[in-house]
Amino acid sequence: MATAQAQLETKWWSGGKSPFNVEYGKLMMWYFLMSDTFTFGAFLISYGTIRFSQNFWPDPNHVFNAFPFAGHANLPLAFVSLMTFILIISSVTMVLAVHAGHHMDRKGVIKWMIWTILGGFAFLACQAWEWTHLITGEHAVMIDGQIKEIGTTVSMNPWGPAIKGVMHDGHQVYSTGPVAFGGYFFGITGFHGFHVFSGVVINIVMLIMTVNGVFDRKGHYQMIEKAGLYWHFVDLVWVFVFLCFYLI
Amino acid sequence: MDHQSESTEITFHHAPGGDDTVKRIIRTTILLSVITIIELALGFVIYFMHKGENPSHTLILFIKGVIVILSLAKAFYIVSIFMHLGDEIKNLIMTIVVPLALFIWFITAFIWEGSSWLNLRNTDGHSKPNIEKHQAAPEGKKPGGVE
């Protein structure tokens, strides 16, 4: 309450201080993230437009039903929920690193940053597996009257409607699905994966700086806060990628 | 030098926060996990509805709407608690949140566009506008109608 009172009494625009009560770098990180929200938003909305314009769109529960080392078991939503929880947990360890930074606790920052980086690598590994599985996993598809086995790429989509009664090697044969499916999936998850990767690189730099005692000499751990904002944003975007590609 | 410039820029710091902050982080983590589990459960409901005979599309659309609202709730908690935007002063919150209102029109306009595109696709594009088809349909039915 005392803070709220102070907020009201402070003349924010009288100069000599930040009118937003944050350091310049942190404010710019917020504005960068806001612009990045619009970039991701534009991608996802474009995907939505194309999806709305199609009579048929592949069912995510049918496309994403594999799990590493589970063979051909039908496990919809299982792998992606693992990825989601990895990202949520790494977001939590990041916020704990920021919290340790507020208390100038160098050991705590190092410990939580290491966990965050490991979470980031785990997520990237999952995504690498998912992409490999999708690109190399071939499915029988009827193209111009011939049965071909194709994987999912930016130019091929085997996930069309099932052709009733036509089987190939004991598997259901499908017609080709909308080509845009692969393009949007690889484009948007790839752009998100690129953010995760750059986030991991930033976190590693922060870890090295912490170990070298740079922030102790500066007297504050604000750089950890800024890196934290970026890392949480990566988690935030995943909430919507998860929603648009896997859930609905 | 950095330290000095930081202290003149910032008028007052957030409450330092001890165990209370950690408790709040743990509470938010549990909340996010529970919301995610509910979303997954609803995802499975949709999966089994699709598998079953004659799925109700209105109900599926409703469940998808619920999942969207749950995702927005998750986004709110991540931004407000994990990114500490909720602890910042109102000036900052407004400059971040208000521009996002553009998304309301952005999403509406493009979904509208997509539906219109679907409509054109199913009416042979510009060669057969929708109106013509609607007018043609009753005529085609006439012979059957006169009994």
Image (cartoon, rainbow, N blue to C red):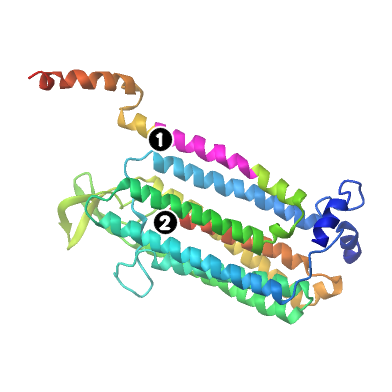
**Which element is circle 2 on?**
helix
Q: Which residue is mark 1?
A: B115
The image's mark for residue A245 is none
Residue of label 2? A247
Quarter holding the N terminus of chain B?
bottom right
B45 relative to B89 in the view: left or right? left
Q: Label 2 is placed on what type of residue?
A: Leu
Q: Residue drawn at (36%, 40%), measured in percent from left and top? A: A54
Given the image, what chain letter belongs to the residue carrying mark 2? A
Would you say residue B101 sits in the magenta stretch?
Answer: yes
Q: Name the side, left or right, on which A237 lies relative to B52.
A: right
The secondary structure that most of the magenta stretch takes on is helix
Residue A139's x, y, as percent? 27, 58
View extreme (left): residue:
B147
Q: Quadrant of the C terminus of chain B?
A: top left
Q: In the drawing, does residue A246 fall left or right of residue B88?
A: left
Q: Is residue B28 magenta?
A: no
Residues shaded magenta? B100-116
The residue shown at (36%, 34%) is B118
Whether residue A85 is visible: yes
Tell me where residue A101 sits by quadrant: bottom right
Q: Are marks 2 and 1 on the same chain?
A: no
**Toward which corner of the image does residue A225 lie, by quadrant?**
bottom right
Residue B111 versus residue A71: which sits nearer the camera? B111
Judged from this view, the residue extending furthest toward the bottom is: A107
Q: Secondary structure at mark 1?
A: helix
Q: Nearer the viewer, residue A167 or A99?
A: A99
